[in-house]
Amino acid sequence: MNQVLGYLLIFIARISDVSLATMRTLMVVQGRRKQAAIIGFFEVIIYVTALGKVVSGLNDMGNLIAYALGFACGNYIGIFVEEKIALGNLTAQVILKGSENQELINILREKGFGVTVLQGYGREGSREVLNITLNRKDLEVLRNILEENDNSAFITVNTTKPISGGYFTSVKKK
């Protein structure tokens, strides 16, 4: 029974530290130094504890399996948690056919999106290009609006870090 608890401790510790590593990496990329440092502190304590348990019992294959399974599950859970909290900002570029898109643009603005409209020209003629900066958590709302109103829109999304000015607000939920 004691051995099974050891395996469980290693497994849970690895899930925890790898999930924290995922979050810390996101914080580093977004320039959130304090949060990254705090998360890193706890991540390393958990990691060293789990690693110490494994290294002190290298002859026990169960330790290695628990360690590896915890690592794999930690990656999965870390990504899942990161997607749910959706920290950060995105810039979406939406290319619409034609130039009669004012209704869609109004809908986006009514829902709280800041929309900048540019004129473009593609292989098949005139296009309107919408630049929309949004919170990551609002991406699904944007996608749903676009699919409901123009399912032929070409959409690209990039991570962004706004530094000054502009229109940035929380999106109004339906």
Image (cartoon, rainbow, N blue to C red):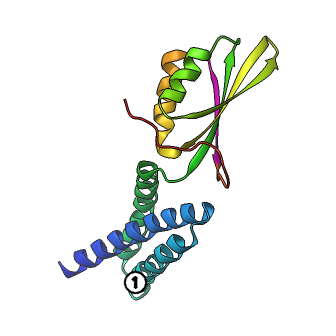
The C terminus lies in quadrant: top left
Above or below residue 129? Residue 53 is below
Q: Residues within 10 Å of mark 1 (few under 14, many from 20)?
A: some
Farthest residue in the bottom direction?
56
Q: Residue at x 36, y 73 (%)?
A: 13
Q: Residue at x 56, y 15 (%)?
A: 103
Q: Residue at x 82, y 15 (%)?
A: 123
Q: Position of residue 16 (x, y in %)?
A: 38, 69
Q: Name the main secondary structure of what is drawn in magenta.
A: strand
Q: Position of residue 35 (x, y in %)?
A: 50, 71
Q: Nearer the viewer, residue 62 or 16?
A: 16
Does residue 95 show up?
Answer: yes
Seen in the image, is 8 located left or right of residue 131? left
The N terminus lies in quadrant: bottom left
Q: Secondary structure at mark 1?
A: helix
Q: Position of residue 75 (x, y in %)?
A: 46, 59
Does residue 65 show up?
Answer: no
Above or below residue 15? Residue 54 is below
User: Which image quarter: residue 92?
Assistant: top right
Q: Nearer the viewer, residue 57 or 140?
A: 140
Q: Amino acid at mark 1?
A: Thr
Above or below residue 3? Residue 85 is above
Q: Residue at x 42, y 62 (%)?
A: 74
Seen in the image, is 162 located left or right of residue 53? right
The magenta segment = 150-159
Which residue in the structure is indicated by mark 1? 49
Q: Position of residue 43 (x, y in %)?
A: 45, 75
User: Which image quarter: residue 101?
Assistant: top right
